[in-house]
Amino acid sequence: MPFPDMLVAPEEDPSEHWSARAWCRKLEPDALFVEGKAQQRAKRICLNCEVVVECLVEALDERIEFGVWGGMTERERRKMLRHHPEITSWKRVFEARARLKKASGE
């Protein structure tokens, strides 16, 4: 499974946890812990969120099993983990991708 091109980790402000800037912070938590077709609606919440990458990274690195995190359902995250068992730190992967994109001028 290829890495989605849109997922490039921005530089972080170490003084603030990413979740403080998440769009979903003002929603009922249950809005992201849904099943079936409701997951597609929940994923749309993440579309324009500035911390979607950080959220996804935490879900992948911490092996969070339930809910929509970083615009991906638990099934989608399990698939990524299954296809890339060699990755022990998704944070490092996305940071490296961000450096490569920055170096190439994208």
Image (cartoon, rainbow, N blue to C red):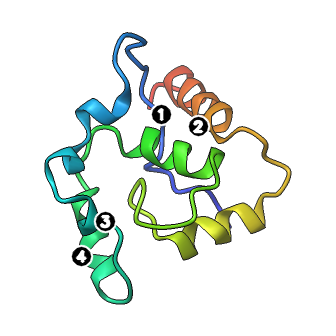
* Alpha-carbon span between mark 1 and mark 4: 24 Å
Nearer the N terminus, badge 4 or badge 2? 4
Q: Which mark is residue 32?
A: 3
Which callout, 4 or 3, points at the residue further toward the start of the chain?
Answer: 3
Residue closest to the far right: 86
- State the residue lying farthest toward the top: 15
Earlier sequence position, callout 1 versus callout 2: 1
Q: Nearer the viewer, residue 14 or 5?
A: 14
Position above or below: 18 against 36: above
Front disc: 1 or 4: 4
Considering every residue shown, the one lying at the far bottom of the view is 36
- Horizontal relation, residue 66 to residue 47: left or right: right
Residue receiving disc 4? 41
Labels 1 and 2 touching (C-beta < 8 A) = yes
* Quarter of the image that includes the N terminus: bottom right
Question: Badge 3: how crowded within 10 Å, few (<14), some, or many (20+)?
Answer: many
Q: Quadrant of the C terminus?
A: top left
Mark carried by residue 94: 2
